[in-house]
Image (tube, helix red, strand yellow):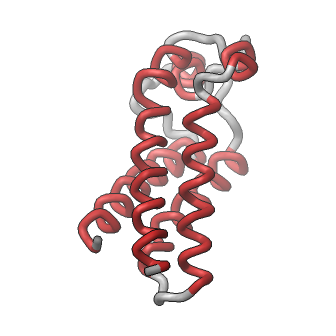
């Protein structure tokens, strides 16, 4: 289980690093802010990336999730791993929900969300569910 915890933590740290770049106003991997916002946010009519506070909050949440598998074994750890798994699964389900499709219609986000972002969230959800089960055992 240590291997999947390591993979999950590394993946989340990379995603957090990208969000930190955005919080600092570094538009990567797309230099055009409007196109980047339409690619990673997708809200109807979006032209600007979310601000530094919103991006920083995502960074903090992702880093907490990345650290959680390394906490000492306890019921608190198991509950946290389960909660993280649920959050990732809800995010994945949201990608296919009609209300989200209406709220985030911009391309290429809509296609990327269903093809890549949601499946990555499903994978993280499964990994954290496995880690939660192992932590409860």
How many numbered dots are placed on residues in this image? 0
Residue positioned 62% across, 62% down in the render: 83
The image quarter containing residue 93 is top right
Vertical placement of 124 versus 9: above or below? above
The x, y position of residue 52, in whole percent, is 67, 47
The x, y position of residue 91, in whole percent, is 60, 39
The N terminus, quarter of image: bottom left
> Foreground: 1 or 58?
1
Which residue ends up furthest to the left in the rendered image? 3
Vertical placement of 109 versus 4: above or below? above
Vertical placement of 55 versus 96: above or below? below
Residue positioned 48% across, 69% down in the render: 132
Residue positioned 46% across, 60% down in the render: 128
The x, y position of residue 8, in whole percent, is 36, 59
> Foreground: 8 or 85?
85
Vertical placement of 124 versus 22: above or below? below
The x, y position of residue 98, in whole percent, is 70, 16
The C terminus, quarter of image: bottom left
The image quarter containing residue 134 is bottom left
């Amino acid at each position: 289980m240590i291997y999947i915890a390591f993979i999950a933590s590394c993946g989340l740290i990379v995603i957090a690093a990208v969000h930190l770049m955005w919080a600092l106003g570094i538009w990567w991997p797309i230099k055009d802010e409007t196109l980047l916002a339409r690619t990673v946010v997708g809200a109807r009519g979006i032209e600007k990336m979310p601000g530094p506070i919103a991006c920083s909050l995502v960074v903090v949440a992702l880093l907490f999730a990345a650290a959680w598998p390394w906490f000492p074994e306890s019921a608190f750890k198991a509950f946290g791993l389960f909660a993280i798994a649920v959050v990732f699964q809800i995010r994945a389900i949201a990608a296919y929900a009609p209300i989200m499709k209406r709220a985030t219609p911009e391309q290429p986000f809509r296609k990327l969300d269903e093809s890549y972002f949601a499946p990555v969230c499903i994978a993280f959800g499964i990994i954290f569910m496995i880690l939660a089960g192992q932590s409860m055992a």
